[in-house]
Amino acid sequence: MLRFTVLLSCLIASSALADEDDDDFGTLNPDEMSLGRVMENIRRGQTDMSSCAAGYLITKSGRHGLAREVFETCANDGYSGAMTWMSQLDNNGLGGEYDPDAAANWDRRAAEAGDPVGKFNYGIDLMRGHGVAQDEARGRALVDEAAAHGLVIARRLQAAGYDLDEVTPDADNWKYAPLF
């Protein structure tokens, strides 16, 4: 009977502790590695490399609207990789409207931040005149910079004499055709 009384007392004491407000002790078991936590951090404006990288998994799972939230917040905090992902979303109408002007702007920002992928993408935008006024010489110069940074696809484009068909699937040709 004494054991039962001691056990019952322990259970009552532990349930009383469990009822105490988490705020008194902080979050006792935080949800650290979940989509919910990533989105909570992003919506509070808290960006870090892990949260920004989670945008990739989020968009690959087909949740482009959530990925857009992550990438836009991270891009605005200076993560150049998130800028190139915002360009990809805008250039393909994922989680929003197809917007080549916005896509080129994200590429430009990434290029200006020194990102080799941003330089390559913005170089191609300039060469095509897609979302930005056409300037083939400036576009090639940016592709050359990306190649100098070691970006393999930029070197491949150089080796192909800047023939954009080398790096773009022909299924996308409709997108880059002149509008007039």
Image (spheres, rainbow, N blue to C red):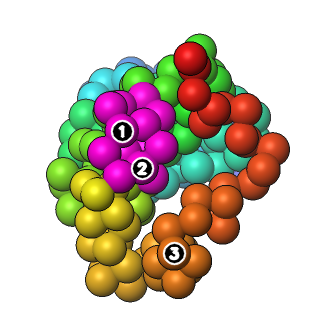
Residues shaded magenta: 124-136
In the rendered image, which quarter contains the C terminus? top right
Mark 2, Cα crowd under 10 Å, few <14 / some 14-19 / many 20+, is many
Q: Is residue 7 left or right of residue 37?
A: right
Q: Residue furthest front?
A: 180
Mark count: 3
Q: Is residue 82 left or right of residue 67?
A: left
User: Eyeballing the image, is 107 above or below 176?
Assistant: below
Q: Residue at x 53, y 83 (%)?
A: 159
Q: N-terminal of the two: label 3 or label 1?
A: 1
Q: Residue at x 32, y 74 (%)?
A: 144
Residue type beneath disc 3: Gly
Residue 47 shows in the view: no
- Report helix, strand or loop for mark 3: loop
Label 2 near label 1: C-beta < 8 Å?
yes
User: Could you say which quadrant of the image residue 21 lies in?
Assistant: top left
Q: Residue at x 67, y 60 (%)?
A: 165
Residue 101 at x, y percent in the picture: 41, 24
Between 104 and 93, which is closer to the camera in this rendering? 104
- Report helix, strand or loop for mark 1: loop
Between 88 and 144, which is closer to the camera in this rendering? 144
List the residue tagged with mark 2: 127
User: Eyeballing the image, is 10 above or below 48?
Assistant: above
Q: Residue at x 57, y 28 (%)?
A: 178
Residue 178 counted in the magenta span: no
Label 2 near label 3: C-beta < 8 Å?
no
Residue 15 at x, y percent in the picture: 58, 29
Residue 34 at x, y percent in the picture: 59, 44
Residue type beneath disc 2: Met
Mark 1, Cα crowd under 10 Å, few <14 / some 14-19 / many 20+, is some
